[in-house]
Amino acid sequence: MEPEEPGRPRRLRLLKGKGRSSTVAVHDEAEVPLGETSGLRFIAGFIRRDKIALTGAIGIGIFFVFGLIQGILETVSDYTHNLALSYSILPSNPFTFNFANSLAPPTFANFPVGIFGYDEVGRSILSRILYAIPKDALASVLIVISAIVIGMFLGISAGYLGGWADEILMRVTDAFLAFPLIVFAVALSLILGNGYTVVLVALTIVWWPTYARFFRAQALTLKSRGYVEAARLSGLSPLSIIIRHIFPNAIDPIVAIATLDFGNVILVYSTLAFLGIGVQVGQPELGSMAASGLQYVPHSWWFPLFPSLVIMAIVVCYSLLGDRIQDMVGGRLSY
Amino acid sequence: MDSRFLMFVARRAVNAVITILIMIALMFAIIHLVAPTPQDLARLYVGTHFTVPELNQIAHRMGFYQPIYVQFYNYVTGIFHGNLGTDTQYGIPELLVLQEYFPVTLNMVVLGTILGIIIGIFTGAIAASNRNTGTDYGIKAIYLGTWAAPIFLVGVFLQLVFAYELGLLPTGQVANPTLAIPPAVTGLPLIDAILAERWVYLYSYLRHLVLPAVTIAVISFGGITRLTRATMVDSLDKDYVKLAYMKGLPKRQVVWGTAFRNAIIPIITLMALSFAFTVGGSVVVEDIFSYHGIGFFFVNAAYNLDYPAILAITVVVGLAVIIANFIADILYGIMDPRVRLT
């Protein structure tokens, strides 16, 4: 463990819940004195005791690692015009029609190609789901991170400076938050023109106000802390105070919210795809697969069901992990 | 009604009005950023099948050559006069379209939200009073599942099970289309049918309402369960709850009479947020159940790139949400006097 800089607490220290009890008992055995929590011990305790959050973490890990590899393959194949490369690690080609299998139900024959059934032109639903994963992974990461960055700058400055800047920011975020998410995102992406990038931009525009409000609240509480006042008295400029003191201390609690939010982004993103927003013709997309499968309900229930279940599984993993991180940040839990 | 409370209401009202104005300005700015020239604007409002001279003429007629502040003034006054543009699909004013479709959605969303709130509050309170037991974990598993489920999964699932497999409920539509629609008095189908004493229509309407409203309830109750559980857990740790137990009151009375009443207040704010969320969700729900409300119309407009309709719906829905937030704020103030001081 490297030496700690004064004024910049390491992440783990914030997880301990400032100034409350010295130990937090979650499970009856092994109350770990908080002062002794080290990074390694934390991870070991996490793996040993928290099977539920571990499941979430593993699920998300697989989602991201697979998304990264598949995403790289798809991008490379796009640039080299070598389509075969983009599905080289998938069970089957997600684009070729095979009418013999048209709307065939899930089957264990030819494992694992057919376990989720086939769509209306006989493409493996599993392959198409896997092909669509990188877009969802990228969307969730990009949107949450850009929303955090924008919200951080505006929220912290408004909260710290107060007065008119604060008042204006609050009313603007009120106005943004008044639009129901899906309605506003659809309107924006239609006005800006259709496409994947447009959906990312539209969702970022929809997403930042929540974070702005959150960071503002953080800045307001941190502003009155002793070390911030000491910094102000010592003549530090507002900008340096924000950068050196407010920001490092405001970022920790955001981790929990962001983890839960990754799942929300995927939900809204797939809902937009369900409505046909940001989908390119022929490209697999979880939401749009569910939408096209809807025409074949009730006979081919597997067609809309499995893409939706995959979305649900991803979001559940995020919730399991995010819930637990929130408990840790809130000081209710420690290992 | 003391003067402090009136001040509180006045301050919230001013905030709401400012928010509405900023929201309208936001819409105006987005439109003008995307369509910077008068021709672009005209194309946005009347569709693409016009020649450039025709577009110029339309732009002149609609005042798009005027200075930007005049346009803004016209836009704002237009909205408050109910002038939301003309629909490019139907060729009638948007206000008429909205009058037709919005009440249908409002009826469904309000009933669905109320159902979701009731389920959420009860499951949350039950989970909190049985903390860290099987019941608690069971409720958590259920709400995590419904929370994480995409709206269309819930809708399709309910439709598959209750409409197609069991045949208990209709698969879609607002009511049986062969029945005459009761004359519009309030616009809300439920109240209109009662006023006109059309009991057959009312029965059909309610049967068709069940699945969409339940879908809305299912997707929205998770957040409320979560918050209710959290506030109830706090409330159950308070001294007055311990006192109630010490007085020898039965658990049921302590949970529902003492702890529950104090835990309910923070949930009101979430109810308004929940309303905004479900209005957005109604877009998908109505698409699945072919429920002809504003969401169905919105999706239709999106497919046909009917920009005036999209903009009008966005503004009207935003207004509805701001009003809902305002009402929630006031309710909050009534129920918790401490809020009025801030």
Image (cartoon, rainbow, N blue to C red):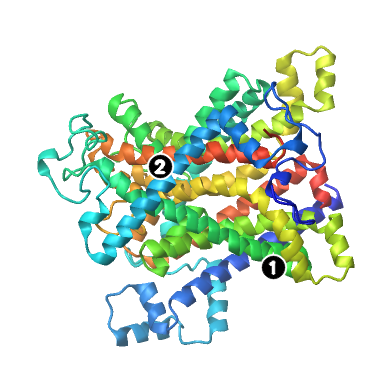
Q: Secondary structure at mark 1?
A: helix
- Chain to which mark 2 belongs: A
Residue A168's disc is 1
**Which subunit holds the residue at mark 1?**
A
Q: Secondary structure at mark 2?
A: helix
Q: Is residue B92 found left or right of A104 in the rendered image?
A: right
Q: Position of residue B309 (x, y in %)?
A: 41, 63
Q: Residue at x 85, y 66 (%)?
A: A232
**Compared with residue A258, is residue A304 higher up or lower down, i.e. above or below?**
above
Q: Viewer-nearest of labels 2 and 1?
A: 2
Residues B328 and A224: in front is A224
Where residue A64 appears, as percent x and y from the top left, is: 43, 47
User: Which amino acid type is marked by label 2?
Assistant: Ile
Q: Give neighbour class at mark 1: few <14, some 14-19, many 20+ (Cα, 10 Å).
A: some
Disc 2 designates what residue? A311
Residue B187 in sight here = no
The image quadrant of residue A71 is: bottom left
